[in-house]
Amino acid sequence: MAEQTATATRPAAVTADGYRLGQRPALDGLRAIAVAMVLFNHTALPHSGTAGTVGVTVFFVLSGFLITRLLLEEWDTRDDISLSRFYIRRALRLMPAMVLYVIVTAVVAIRYDERLEQVLWAGLYVTNIVRTLGEYVTLTPHTWSLAMEEQFYLVWPALLIGLLSVLRLSRRGLALALVAMIGLSLAYRYWLIDTGASLQRLHNDPLVVSFSLLVGCLLAVVVAWRGWRFLGGLAFAASLAVLVSLCGQDKGVWVYGLMVPATTLASAVAILVVVRDGKGPRWVHAVLTWAPLRGLGKISYGLYLWHYTVYYVVKQQLPGAETSQVWTRVVVEVLLSLAVATLSYHLIESKFLKLKDSARWSTRVRS
């Protein structure tokens, strides 16, 4: 999934609530846990049924939090948010790897006689919409969540500017507005469930999925509240236990009625423990900043982007991969995915990350 760098957008600025995001290396550890759940789910091993849904939900809450917090801090120091700069930075982070992914996956589609329009939907970030409308996607289904995040990037910053500059909402007013949006998303979710909507629609519908992103946005608004300081290592351990316990469930309506909201709240608690003001639990920081975990987190976008195509090709090339060679297949899938994601990060993504964080596109205020 897409990664937002949790760095302070200005070194000496004072924000409206006194909180600055700053460097949060432990967030890479959370990304690693989330992407590992997705990879586990797509191996189709026993007890992996809902792991992908859990992992993607963690990503959504984290994205909502980081994007909103960085935008709020830019607003606090500039009294403005540059949409053009925001969109350019997002494009520099996401598009280079996506362009190559589309080209390679198109070749795979032709080679294995898959429908090419699936690759087009992925490149246009509309997979979630076409799946909501009932299309069955076999080669690029995982890109539904990338599409959801891209649509969030397009809509939310402009809406946030309107709430701050036109309605002149305070932090409390913004929090109340987000609570109302979250309530509407939940109401729509349960209306769909009550009317017998398909699981595919519940999984992909942007208005349903926005719930987790909006909870992350709300988190960014209220993160400075001193009451969060009671959240410590026990809260983090409990939230992680909830996330892990929900990974091996069978798919059903209950996943979208109960499990996804529970996963969203558990993700919010885990993120709060990591990013809240004050010194967090040492063991949590030590675990999440463990070098292998941080390394996995850094390549999580490429790993998420590429792994499904890698898995698909491996399944085609290993005869009997679903039976006698299942463990061989899984090991090959995971190792190849890690290799491709590592190459993607170092040869492509890192080059554009430097450009994204350069002075030209930075939101830092120079003193």
Image (spheres, rainbow, N blue to C red):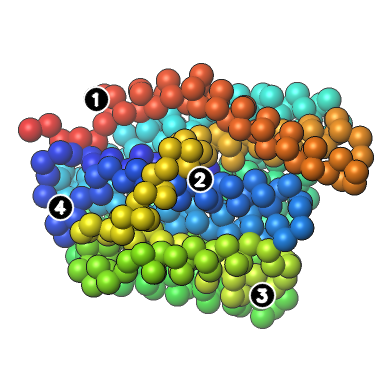
Whether residue 115 is visible here, answered yes or no, is: no
User: Which residue is painted at 22% across and 62% down in the image?
Assistant: 224
Residue ID for mark 1: 359
Distance of mark 2 from mark 3, alpha carbons? 26 Å
Q: Which of the 4 image quadrants contains residue 192?
A: bottom right
Q: Which quadrant of the rendered structure holds the C terminus?
A: top left
The residue type indicated by label 1 comes to Ala
| Label 1 crowd bin: few (<14), some (14–19), many (20+), radius 10 Å | few
User: Which residue is painted at 20% across and 59% down in the image?
Assistant: 278
**Of circles 1 and 3, which is in front?**
3
User: Which residue is painted at 35% across and 28% down in the image?
Assistant: 356
Q: Could you say whether the residue bearing mark 3 is in a helix, strand or loop?
A: helix
- Residue 5 locus on image (x, y percent): 36, 39
Residue situated in front as seen by the camera: 276 or 217: 276
Residue situated in front as seen by the camera: 189 or 309: 309
Residue ID for mark 3: 254
| Label 3 crowd bin: few (<14), some (14–19), many (20+), radius 10 Å | few
Residue situated in front as seen by the camera: 351 or 24: 24
Residue ID for mark 4: 15
Q: Are marks 2 and 3 in contact (CB under 8 Å)?
A: no
Q: Could you say whether the residue bearing mark 4 is in a helix, strand or loop?
A: loop
Indicate which disc residue 32 carries.
2
The residue type indicated by label 2 comes to Ala
- Residue 230 locus on image (x, y percent): 27, 72
Distance of mark 4 from mark 3, alpha carbons? 41 Å
Q: Please report whichever mark, 1 or 2, sits nearer to the chain's N-terminal start.
A: 2
The residue type indicated by label 3 comes to Trp
